[in-house]
Image: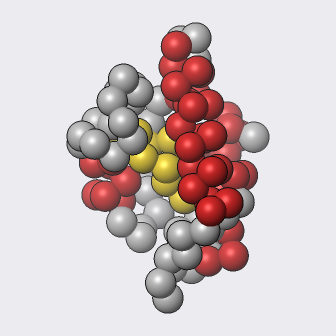
Amino acid sequence: MKRPHTRAFEKHKQEFFEQGKALDAAGDPRADCWICHKRIDYSVPAGSTPTSHELDHYYVFSKYPELFDDPANFRHAHRQCNRERGDGQPKADLGDVIAQWW
Ligand SMILES: [Zn+2]
């Protein structure tokens, strides 16, 4: 299935980036990459470098297309980490990650 690129999603994506940038400026670790837990470079545009921000979907699109546009499913990630992850679920303890977030 082709990923939808709706105007609503583009807006959510931009808002999510700004939210992460604000958290990072405040020293909040929730702005860090949820996959490797290192800081994301919010000084450059999203997706422009391997360590820049990329919106990751916790529940991958291939299995949960209905959650594609749901902000509760968004996670801050490095572009590189997100690409390496692909469609797989990370090996980390997901229960902890979810608890920290929501
Ligand atoms: Zn990372």
Q: Position of residue 75 (x, y in %)?
A: 56, 46
Q: Position of residue 40 (x, y in %)?
A: 38, 30
Q: Quadrant of the C terminus?
A: top right
Judged from this view, the residue extending furthest toward the front is: 7
Judged from this view, the residue extending furthest toward the left is: 50
The answer to whether residue 55 is above or below residue 102 is below
User: Residue 45 is drawn in which quadrant?
Assistant: top left
Query: Which residue corresponds to the image point at 42% horizontal and 70% vertical from the top-left?
Result: 87
Judged from this view, the residue extending furthest toward the bottom is: 1
* Apparent side of residue 14 relative to residue 37 in the rendered image (left or right): right
* Apparent side of residue 40 relative to residue 5 in the rendered image (left or right): left
Query: Which residue corresponds to the image point at 49% horizontal and 88% vertical from the top-left?
Result: 1
Q: Position of residue 24 (x, y in %)?
A: 51, 19
User: Is the image coloured rainbow, by chain, by secondary structure, or in one colour?
Assistant: secondary structure
Foreground pick, 9 / 89: 9
Q: Is residue 98 visible?
A: yes
Judged from this view, the residue extending furthest toward the top is: 26
Query: Which residue corresponds to the image point at 58% horizontal and 21% vertical from the top-left?
Result: 22
Q: Position of residue 20 (x, y in %)?
A: 55, 30
The number of discs equals: 0
Query: Which residue corresponds to the image point at 68% horizontal and 38% vertical from the top-left?
Result: 101
Q: Is residue 35 visible?
A: no
